[in-house]
Image (cartoon, rainbow, N blue to C red):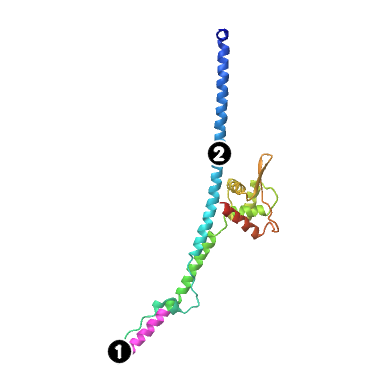
Amino acid sequence: MAVADASENTPIQSRYAQRFAVDREVNRKEQEVISAQITELQERLKQLKADEVLLSDMQCVVAAAAEQQSAPVVLDAGAPAEAASPQAVPPPRQETRTKETAAPSRAKKTARAKASGKTTQSAPKKTVAKATIAKTGAKKSAEPPLSELVLGLLLAHAGEPRLTREVHADLEAAHPERATTVQTVRNILDNLANKKVIEKEKKQGSAMYTATKPADVTPTSETAVEDLNEKILATA
């Protein structure tokens, strides 16, 4: 009876104030849960975009290798014309004509063979030209991916933390034909850091990336780049 009397005697303003306080606490907790979920989804989206960039680069490498394997065989320009185009020489015919018609037929065959010889001499040159164009296209498609170029630029400053904009500036200076956006370079660096190929740390709110110098290998050597590229492929 005393408890019931106490609740009845509590002013209505105090009872509503207590209820509002409880509801506000529940609201805040729900906000914290939703905020954590949003942050997790944003990090996942960022990782997926970085993976997409790396997968695109790897796809270019595989396509270039397949194109090189399927390149046409170049014929020797110094080979005899008859060997390059065996159809140019007419097949032998049986001698069914008389002595009077044999001499004119031989003359026609000789003239025809000379004309065929002129035609076949130009065939190897056209074949070599086509093969040269095919090789040029294969070289263009076999350019290293951006991730390999970015990794090489970091190795040139092995042990030195680098900002994204610094790596982007080095890329534009060393490879102007492969210039890209700062965001793309940042995605590549984050992906390399996630694969444990390079190190990432934050200093004064800015992300810094560092390539560790391999033992007994100079930072700019091709061996170091190839070793780290194998690590990328192995973890991709």
Q: Give the range drawn in magenta.
A: 101-117
Assess disc 1: are there few (<14), some (14-19) or many (≥20) residues with their C-alpha within 10 Å of its C-alpha.
few
Residue 146 shows in the view: no
In this orientation, which residue lies closer to the viewer: 84 or 48? 48
Magenta stretch, main secondary structure class: helix
Decide if residue 205 is on the left or right side of residue 9: right
209, above or below 205, in the image? below
Q: Does the magenta stretch include residue 110?
A: yes
Decide if residue 25 is on the left or right side of residue 112: right
201, above or below 76, in the image? above
83, above or below 13, in the image? below
Residue at 57 percent across and 20 percent down: it is 22
* Residue 214: x %, y % from top left: 68, 55
Q: Dot 2 lies on which element?
A: helix
Mark 1 and mark 2: Cα distance apart in space: 92 Å
Q: Which amino acid does label 1 sit on?
A: Thr
Residue 19 shows in the view: yes
Tell me the residue that label 2 is attached to.
42
* Residue 224: x %, y % from top left: 65, 57
In this orientation, which residue lies closer to the viewer: 7 or 229? 7
Q: Which amino acid does label 2 sit on?
A: Gln
Q: Dot 1 lies on which element?
A: helix
Tell me the residue that label 1 is attached to.
101
* Residue 128: x %, y % from top left: 49, 71
Q: Is residue 104 magenta?
A: yes
